[in-house]
Image (tube, rainbow, N blue to C red):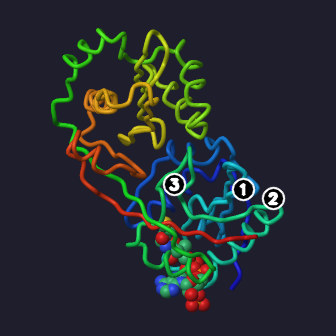
């Protein structure tokens, strides 16, 4: 039997949230975070966001988005699921066919699954979703790497005030960013870390910005952010330090400031996603590898 595949409509949000929570064994999402992944994506493609329905019931979902990164046109399956009772009937394949046609029209070079920079839910496929791995291989994707999310127990002492006071002797000031610092931070990241601009904007949406900075002679030279993706879940990052300030312990100070914020928000744990320097986080925060993700790619050209 063929089920219609139609464009997602904003009115689908509550039912789509319930559907995803039913279909995903290892993840849960709420309406706010799902909306952040959908319309909240700065390159939201409603024409590439599909639901499959049986009558009024959502039985399948697939969202596509694209990013231009240093001259390569990346296309992504950002989220996907098929209801457990409707699997192995070609529903994900039918949605994928539509998505792939759109991506080819947009001259995408390569497709990936889930690991969408600057606004994403999880940075790849958790291999415990074994049907998803099998499906990806069948659709012509190849595994090219893996990554992990670390977990930090926030019930630790994150105070670094003595170190921060000592740094003042070198004309280095560390503090929470104020709304009027936003442009200076965006300017600071624009050469090396342009992709992080959206996350900086997101961190500034909180009542008190979820972002901390280090200034050398009044100029922003390092920053760390949290609550910039998957808001409310204890999501850390991004963070970056200019070479002028490296080797001064700045990363640890800025990391711990964010962890302290999350502790004060009443969270028990923080997630350090899509890592990266495991040793750095493990050393400074006792972070442990929590979830592992495999990354898949399919060349379209
Ligand atoms: C992954 C998922 C979306 C696939 O949906 P689906 O509609 O069942 O997939 P299709 O029917 O299009 O499958 C196409 C092919 O993929 C492969 N495949 C799919 N599921 C498989 C499984 N459980 N085991 C082995 N191969 C599988 C098969 O080759 C299949 O073709 P076949 O049935 O003719 O042999 C679905 O299993 C799902 O929703 N899983 C849970 C959510 C999830 O994992 N989301 C992604 C998280 S990263």
Marks 1 & 2, CB-CB < 8 Å contact? yes
Q: Position of residue 181 (x, y in %)?
A: 52, 15
Please name the residue shown 41% across and 30% down the image: 224
Rendering quadrant holding ligand 1:
bottom right
Q: Position of residue 233 (x, y in %)?
A: 38, 42
**Residue 274 visible in the snapshot:** yes
Residue labelled with disc 3: 17
Please name the residue shown 50% across and 79% down the image: 85
Q: Position of residue 240 (x, y in %)?
A: 45, 34
Please name the residue shown 64% across and 44% down the image: 39
Callout 1: SS: strand
Q: Quadrant of residue 269?
A: top left
Residue labelled with disc 1: 73
| Relative vertical location of residue 204 with respect to residue 90 in this rendering, above or below | above
For disc 2, the neighbor class at 10 Å (few under 14, some 14 to 19, many from 20) is: few
From the viewer's perspective, is 159 left or right of 124? left
Inter-mark Cα distance, 2 to 3: 29 Å
From the image, which quarter does the C terminus lie in?
bottom right
| Relative vertical location of residue 14 with respect to residue 235 in this rendering, above or below | below
Callout 2: SS: loop
Q: Position of residue 86 (x, y in %)?
A: 55, 79
């Amino acid at each position: 039997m063929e089920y219609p595949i139609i464009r997602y409509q904003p009115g689908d949000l509550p039912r789509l949230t319930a559907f995803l929570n039913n279909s995903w064994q290892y993840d849960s999402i709420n309406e706010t975070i799902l909306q952040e992944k959908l319309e909240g994506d700065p390159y939201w493609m409603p024409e590439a966001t599909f639901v499959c329905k049986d009558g009024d019931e959502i039985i399948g979902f697939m969202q596509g988005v694209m990013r231009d990164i240093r001259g390569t046109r990346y296309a992504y399956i950002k989220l996907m699921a098929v209801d457990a009772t409707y699997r192995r009937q070609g529903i994900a394949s039918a949605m994928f066919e539509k998505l792939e046609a759109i991506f080819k029209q947009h001259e995408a070079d390569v497709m990936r699954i889930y690991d969408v920079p600057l606004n994403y839910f999880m940075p790849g496929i958790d291999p415990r979703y074994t049907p998803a791995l099998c499906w990806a291989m069948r659709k012509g994707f190849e595994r090219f790497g893996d990554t992990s999310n670390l977990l930090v127990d926030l019930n630790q002492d994150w105070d670094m005030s003595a170190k921060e006071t000592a740094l003042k002797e070198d004309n280095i000031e560390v503090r929470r960013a104020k709304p009027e610092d936003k442009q200076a931070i965006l300017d600071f990241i624009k050469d090396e870390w342009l992709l992080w601009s959206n996350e900086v904007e997101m961190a500034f949406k909180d009542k008190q910005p979820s972002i901390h900075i280090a200034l050398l002679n009044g100029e922003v030279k390092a920053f760390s952010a949290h609550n910039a993706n998957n808001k409310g879940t204890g999501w850390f990052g991004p963070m970056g330090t200019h070479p002028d300030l490296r080797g001064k312990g700045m990363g640890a100070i800025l990391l711990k400031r964010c962890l302290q914020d999350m502790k004060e928000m009443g969270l028990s744990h923080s997630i350090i996603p899509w890592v990266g320097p495991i040793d750095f986080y493990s050393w400074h925060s006792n972070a442990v590898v929590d979830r592992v993700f495999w990354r898949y790619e399919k060349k379209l050209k």
